[in-house]
Amino acid sequence: MHGNEPVGREILIYLVQYLCENYGKNQRVTKLVDDTNIFILPSMNPDGFEKAAEGECGNMNGRPNANGIDLNRNFPDQWPQNVRDSAQSAGIQPETKSLIDWIESNPFVLSANLHGGSLVASYPFDDSSKHRNAFYSGSPDDDFFKKAAQVYSNNHRTMHVRNCPGDHFEGGITNGAKWYDVPGGMQDYNYLHSNCFEITIELSCCRYPHGRTLPTEWDNNRDALMAYMELVHTGVKGFVYDAFTNEAISGAVIIVQEIAHNVTSVSHGDYWRLLAPGIYNMAVFKEGYEMSRANNVQVIEGPATEVTFRLEPTERPLQSPPTVATQISAGSFIEPTIFHHHNHEVMTAMLQDYAHRYPHITYLYSIGQSVQGRDLWVMEISDNPGAHEQGEPEFRYVGNIHGNEVVGRELIINMIQFLCENYGHSPEITDLVDKTRIHLLPSINPDGYAKAKEGDVQGEVGRANANNVDLNRDFPDQFYEREGTLQPETKAGIQWTLAYPFVLSAGLHGGSLVANYPYDSDKLMKVMYSKCPDDAVYIQLSEAYSFEHPTMHLGHPNTQCPNVYPDETFDEGITNGAAWYNIRGGFQDWTYLHSNCFEITLELGCVKYPKGEDLPSYWNDNKMAMLKFIQQAHKGVKGFVLNPNGVGISNATIRVTGIDHNITTARDGDYWRLLIPNSYEITAFADGYAPQTQTVTVLEDWAVQVNFTLLLASSIDPQVTVPESSDPLTMPDAKWDRIYNFNLQQNFTKYLSNIDLQKKMAELRAMYSDIITLKQIGISRNNQNIVGLEMRVSNRTVNKPKVALFGGLHGNQPVGRELLWRLAQHLGEGYKQGDHLITNLLTTTTILIIPALDVDGFTIASEGKCEDTYRGDSFAESFLQNDAGHMPERPEVTAMKDLFGLDKFSLVLAIESGGVFTRYPLDNGDSTEDDDLLFDLASQYSLAHPTMHVGELCGDKAMTGGISRGSDWHRALNTMQDYVYRTQNSFMVTAHVTCCLYPDHDKLKKAWRENLEPLKTFLHLIHQGIHGHIHTVMNEPIAGATLKLQGHTMNISVDPQTAEFHRVLPPGKHYLIATAPGFMTVRRQVDIMPNQLTHITINLERELNVSYHDYNKMEVMMRTLSQKYPGLTNFKTIGRSHDLLQLWSLEISKQTGEHLPGKPEIKFIAGMHGNEVVGRELLLALAEYLLKNYQKDDIVTKLVDHTHIHFVPDMNPEGSEAAKSTEGTCVGNTGKLNTHGVDLDRDFPSNISGIIDEKVPEDETNYVMKWMNSRPFVMSVALYGGTLMVRYPYNTKDTAGKPSITPDNDVFQHLAQTYANLHPSMHLGTPACPNNVGEEFDGGIIHGASWLPYSGSMQDYNYDYLNCLELDVFVECCNYPQAKALKGLWENHQASLVEMISQVHQGIKGFVVDREREEPIEDAIISIEGREHHARTHKDGDFWKILLPGSYQVTVKADGYADKTELIHVQAEKATEVHFKLRYDKRIMGLPPVIFVILTAVIVALLVVLIIFFVVKIYRSSNTAKMKRGFYRLDGEKMYQEEYNDRVALRDFNSKDQLLSNEYHDFTDSESDNEIMFNRTS
């Protein structure tokens, strides 16, 4: 976008390559590309790029386009006032126009705009109405935007921990305007003018860095780009359909309550609404349809929640929830002192100021924007701002709908000041705010206001909005169909009304003085009284305001303006709207008709735009009336509608007999119904509940509380007339069939006989021949056919996953028969009518439906028999029995076993009766390794059922949650369910759908309606899990490959030819282990999302060829690996041996060469003893294994990405070369020592014994020590030979001769035992080495000093000098085994070696930084209470300390800083991250600086005084001594010399010239000046 910021340009080119080249190979990439439409635009400003210069970090050349315009200032801005940016006044540029067209023509959901010049993720808004820097300007979706920015920053390698010089961004994110004000930015335009959420990402401190840095930039950003793109699949998604035609509805408005930003459905009716995790109330609005709601929608930290809306066409939208209000009386108040007109910018600033000053009672939000992009601000005032409180009414004032009628605007601003400043001061105001949620909208037409002129009395300038539309004529009207689209202000008003449960409202106008109530119009459009059903209530409400106003109730507006409507009068100061003059499309009528809210219109004076000096009088006239009107929200009847469990019923209807206007309950079941004092019959009813009526007497004062508890209804009292039900269980047949069953009419007059059932199946085959095939399953013992329906769409897809559904397994439980043939019909008709979900299901799945298995038993069973009266010789429990001792296997069982053997079903469902719950295996046994999946399958069915999940009671028994393991319900042997799981490795559950085994046929309708959705839900679970292939790296299928879940014993079925697999899995994280003969094992992590199938291709590398490498071959191999994997390796020498052989090192990591802050470092060293060469080969194999499996094995990939892994395979190259000829020798010392005959493992400094070792280390030791000191190693593994165990420090004894124990002994033991346990035999502790047959090591580990104590070990040096924990692994009894043994040794040690890299990620990690400057603190000490061994921070301030799970007191100390201690809880498997911010300690010698300076000054002053005192005293003492002597012997030589000097001086001053040309000399200044013996007295 800025031509001189091309890092993003190149990163996106890399991204295109990465996605294309990894598609089908990398699971994450494949899934993202399969599930997402990704658009990548590398350069928006190619002209600017041509002018820019590589290497220019701060230069602006090329930033603008060819016209010199900054494109990120060129988009239409929401606050265009006072913008002085030339890019805003230059006109839309061609690039900008192209982007706007692109944005508006594509249904983008998420976007990122890549920039350079800093390192931060910036989110909207980019500017504010103030247009000043450092001013936080949050959008309505601030929570999501912060989350999105943090996701990018956290997945960037450095953004979340490092800033560019001069920047300070907490967590690597910032609000755009908080950073600096950018009017006309693209990210704000996206959010305000489309469904798309965009953030801006600054990628590098340098705008145009050198090309050599681009690989690093790509590595820094790759994971962040992927994680950010995956965010598009979060929040809420779904479709909006016409409930009658099932056609997609585009342009429907998706509303989220209390978030003043909406998105719309697109061309196929689909929508995506990005949201942060939480629970939301949603609604969908579309002109010409009833509003549809979805309450308590849970958004999780993961895949999007699916919510589909079906809208019913209507002339009147559905009523919305109740509204709000409060009450008050006069008192002593704090009054506003400043009265003036507020333009939009000043008003916005004032509102934000009050929201900041009174956060405990205010919540400022915008319900939308005007045509010109001005926010429609609402200030909520409540004791619990931002939330609806149960039982508390909600009230609103709306001002300035006509832009030139400004009195209401200013009164609302005054009311905001008044309520805020009097809360806590005035008991009345405090009580009002505590008991009412008040919403105050000063201006719904800010664009019109901007045009209006002060002093306007009855003018029209500014009345309409910026599109010249009168907003109070723009709402849908009950008596005529409007034309054109709604204005944005109107839409915002509608959505706001429907999003909150308002009870009472008033719109504030100007031009007269009267309270106006509905209706404003009538059918004939004549000036006549147009009464609404609540006319009496409206009169009471209007009079409440009028009578509290000093003049309104007099009914003569002309007293204020005698020349304006001089003859106009209003009785009591109120009027019916249409009786005054008739309007269509008014806000107050729409509000009454389409919500719970009662609204009136208040005309506040005949002058529309009075002078500012007149505003105090308007406030004084209206203040008490406004407060009194809020009080009216507490009149009438209030209460709750509850279910039998005491839970509120939302959207229940409250009807007052004799008043044809109902209201509905809010989310928590609470309601408010405004009524005048009288007695009423009030009825509450809700779908699926019996209505309840109560007689209520409404009093003059407060609302009467009336609660309703509704019982579940089996029938509804015919005397009570209720609206047509929208509950699927109770709605009329025709409506249910239309909405839920594709208009298929159902006949429930009888159960189908076996013959009729077969006829029905043949009929379905004929009707839907393109997708249904009849399948002969077998015959019963009585030679009756068992037939199934196989359903699928024929296409090229082979090996589609299969689902089987069985009914009638017990002949006396035939409900399943009836449900399953109807399900087949439903699926067939859905496919025929183009239902996309069913079409997709049948296209990707094979479904086998067998309605009846026990056809013989059905013929002798009896309808209406609810108990288990029929058992007969049922085969239902004959599947796992042995033939021995039993009768011959039933033909039905044989047929089913043959079926399961032929068709591999991924899922199986049986329908039975005898309860209302879902049963899962085992029926004869306890838990299985797949309990999580089986429980999930059962839960999904139960939760989709309207009552099963609450534990429906059958007799005296109910299953908690509607789920049970079979053996917990009724232990049964040899069931089909257990057979399917144990022998077929398939997953079967059984849904019990009726309490009665064989219910009367009239109960079938209820069972069908209850179970249709659960049945479809179960079918869709086939696409929750994994599907994929196991291939070579050349993408060829691997025959004989096996796949299993980590921790499971049963393999996942893999096709032997195609290597294809499919497995249903429960949501969550799973690890797959893929193996094949001749290939390396690979582990892949899959994150399973609800109702989503993850496609994965697993590529296996051929097994490693482990062989011996001499010094030269080792170098060649390491160099080859480095050249083959340049982005992952750093091959270098760390020094040389005595004979000048290089000590080679290979680093493997996602970013090599330098330590990356926060990334732990581990090293592997071998060959310290040259004759123990097996360690060298294991390390070379480990390095090759890691590199070959990077991005193939997810564990390996994660370790390489997040760890610096170093290898030094041969520390003693001369020794290993000398030992070359000893292959196969298990003992012997040839080559053990270096050229000087020194054992390098006894050559390191040691401080444990108390003896100072002054010897000079060998060259090898010296270079290795320098290398080890150059990196902050956390852990080390050294490989040796000669036995089989793991040794941990210390290796020396203390001065008392006892084995020395480290403070981290528990950690060392854990690490050592972890290594040993993963080795197939090491943990047994009996190596049985030929040279030490009886040697044993408990658990395969040993404390060094307890085995063979010695000093100078590398292991002890690492711990004492480097804070690095080292294990010494003895890998084999034989020092130099035969080459053929290497493959087995590698296989034995592979898991242990890899696990050591994982172990480095345990304990605690973090950073220590200066709290004020956010700069890292190097060499800070991290100490653990109770441990004497400490960690230290690296130069970047990062640290690691391996600890076992538990709680620790951690203290951080650094020179010049105050100590900080925190209690840290360490979890298993992942290091706990802790960031310490230390405060600079300004104390000097333990004293505060001021005290230290004062004390120092006092001490210095005292010293000076003392010095002066002693000098004077000494001086005086000397003079006194001289005077006491009087005469003394003259020194003749000295006397004459002085006399001579005096003469010379006097001679020089003989002339006047000499006197003038010489300085004045004071001849008294001599040693004898004070000697009185030379002074003359006269």
Image (cartoon, rainbow, N blue to C red):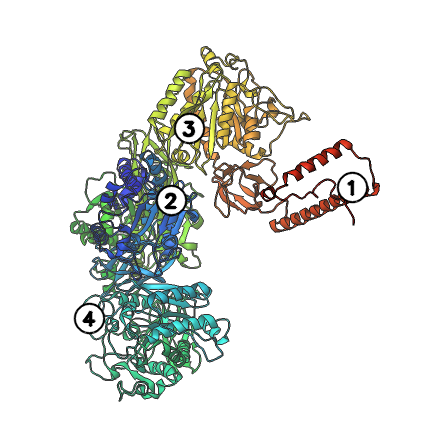
Describe residue 13's horizontal placement relative to residue 393 as left or right: left
* Residue 920 visible in the shown view: no
- On the image, the x and y values in percent for residue 1225 come to 48, 12
Residue marked by disc 1: 1518
Amino acid at dot 3? Glu
Q: How far apart are marks 3 and 1 (CA)?
A: 81 Å
The secondary structure type at the circle numbered 3 is: strand
Nearer to us in this view, 1171 or 1042: 1171
Amino acid at dot 1? Ser
Q: How far apart are marks 4 and 1 (CA)?
A: 117 Å
Residue marked by disc 3: 1147
- On the image, the x and y values in percent for residue 1498 come to 67, 49
Q: Is residue 1165 above or below residue 984?
A: above
- What label sits on residue 482 in the rendered view? 4
Q: Which of marks 4 and 3 is nearer the N terminus?
A: 4
- Which label sits in the foreground, 2 or 1? 1
Q: Which of marks 4 and 2 is nearer the N terminus?
A: 2
Q: Earlier in the sequence, mark 3 or mark 1?
A: 3
Amino acid at dot 2? Leu
Q: Which of marks 2 and 3 is nearer the N terminus?
A: 2
